[in-house]
Image (cartoon, coloured by chain):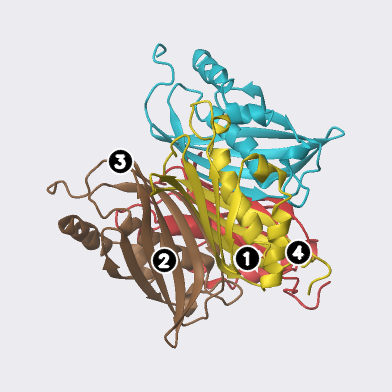
Chain colours: A red, B brown, C yellow, D cyan
């Protein structure tokens, strides 16, 4: 398993959009993930608050990595995100994800996005996601 | 109504994140919206395909504008997006949205994202969204 | 195609739960479906309104039939339902569904539930659903 | 708080649809709920498996009770359910729910449905729900 996890960890370094948002991968295991990012002013919506698309993109980046940690290329089928609170500009956003279930061809996950401010966490969003596993290897050289 | 629509149209010009993605507002009415954007290479995920967060952000930008077109500040509660196909790099993405229902305090919408290539449209994603209307005016000077 | 549609039409006659709710299949094509049911007092929630589970079950019955109209056994992965209005007790509920997209292994659909009263329709709920196609035949004798 | 919890507990005894499904309320606190039901043959779909609408209805019953445990009438806005596994006929279904967040006017919850068989639990479905709090009291006589 560890070898497979390394594949997607390395792949994620090539995620140009995640890079432009400053998303960092902190931890990845077989069933969990943690990432974080620093909110910036260029991520504001027209109401000068962090854009919903930015919050979603952090959770989606976690989904794409956790959902591909077993050398089986997965594609997103459906993501449902509930917004609990608007994060404060300039704070750190953290996403923590876990796998809920998986079959040979499908898998589902739950992600929670938190704002961290003065070492206190506030729940910002919860995302539930479903993916389809294509059965194609990400790295052909590994079983 | 027309006056209220102009408020959010003007506000959207200040959406920094939408601007960084090159999202354009093409049409806004009382119950419908159309926006578009040009996919760029810096929007790729680690698999060199347009990032799910980019597709979502286009739909979410449309949601934020259509949901605020009546001078009643609305916040997103829940968005559920189904991905139908991965759009080709470099193509144009179009989102078309419509209102499904609204009450004094809540509203719901449906958005479809298409890839346009050689004047042919392919359905890329469908998003269903729910918002809460705060009752606060966006522009205090207009009724 | 017509032959495959007949398979699930016949199967649906054995849906015990749908039968207990009085759900009728009105029309099924390759890409659309229409069903209806009569709301009864034993379908009330504790607030004496038609139960959310009843409204969902009508849409879900339509999903199970439309999603299985090609002799390829499909299982539900995810359903997201938005409630627009509470239907009046004793009225007729109608669901109309359409396919949004399909690949060899997955498919997605949109369903709208209406209340019909004095020949007027009111939108009650919208459901977006995703299924996984197992590849197993429902009727082994048909191609 | 205890007094408010008793209001909805008592109300739930009048939920005719939940009663017809044999849904029992086991535990209700300010932020959590547990219910269960026994799967019966009249809850089958056309594939002789417990109907998706039945599984949903159990989760939805839990949502309606947990979401109304503070004497503030709430209505369902959106429910998104992911199905992980088909429960075995004749087993016990258990739903456990928790509140995720709440504001004065909106609230969100997470529900997990398990099949219990020989004292082993299997995750059957996960539902994420959003409600709108009308501000109307359920029991006028209690603050």
Q: Disc 3 on helix, strand or loop?
A: loop
Q: Are marks 1 and 2 in contact (CB under 8 Å)?
A: no
Quadrant showing the N terminus of chain B = bottom left
- Residue C17 lies left or right of residue B78; in this view the side is right
Q: Can see residue A115?
A: no
Q: CA distance from mark 3 to mark 2?
A: 26 Å
| Residue lying furthest right | D118
Tag 2 residue: B58
Which chain does tag 1 point to? C
Query: Could you say where residue D94 lies in the image, as x and y percent from the top left?
Result: 71, 33
User: Of discs 3 and 2, which sits in the foreground?
Assistant: 3
Q: CA distance from mark 4 to mark 2?
A: 33 Å
Q: Disc 1 on helix, strand or loop?
A: strand
Q: CA distance from mark 1 to mark 2?
A: 23 Å
Q: Disc 2 on helix, strand or loop?
A: helix
Taking depth in this image into account, of B50 and C34 the one nearest to the observer is: C34
| Residue lying furthest front | C118
Query: Could you say where residue A47 lies in the image, as x and y percent from the top left?
Result: 29, 53
Tag 1 residue: C107
Which chain does tag 2 point to? B
Query: Could you say where residue C89 lies in the image, as x and y percent from the top left?
Result: 47, 34
Tag 4 residue: C134
- Residue A143 lies left or right of residue C122; in this view the side is right
Going from N to C along the chain, the mark reached first, 1 or 4, is: 1
Q: Are marks 4 and 2 on the same chain?
A: no
Return the mark for residue B47.
none
Tag 3 residue: B104
Label 2: how many Cα within 10 Å (few below 14, some 14–19, many 20+)? many
- Tell me which corner region of the image, top left, top right, bottom left or bottom right, holds residue C18: top right
Residue drawn 22% across and 45% down? B137
Q: CA distance from mark 1 to mark 3?
A: 35 Å
């Amino acid at each position: 398993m560890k070898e497979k996890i390394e594949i997607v960890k390395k792949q994620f370094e090539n995620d140009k959009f995640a890079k432009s948002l400053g998303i960092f991968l902190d931890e990845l295991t077989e069933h969990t993930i943690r990432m974080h990012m620093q909110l910036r002013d260029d991520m504001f919506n027209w109401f000068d608050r962090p854009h919903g698309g930015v919050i979603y993109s952090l959770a989606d980046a976690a989904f794409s990595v956790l959902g591909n940690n077993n050398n089986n290329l997965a594609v997103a089928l459906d993501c449902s995100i509930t917004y609990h609170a608007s994060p404060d500009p300039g704070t750190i956003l953290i996403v923590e994800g876990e796998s809920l279930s998986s079959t040979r061809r499908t898998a589902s996950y739950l992600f929670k996005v938190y704002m961290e401010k003065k070492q206190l966490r506030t729940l910002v969003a919860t995302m539930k996601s479903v993916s389809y596993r294509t059965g194609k290897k990400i790295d052909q050289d590994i079983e």
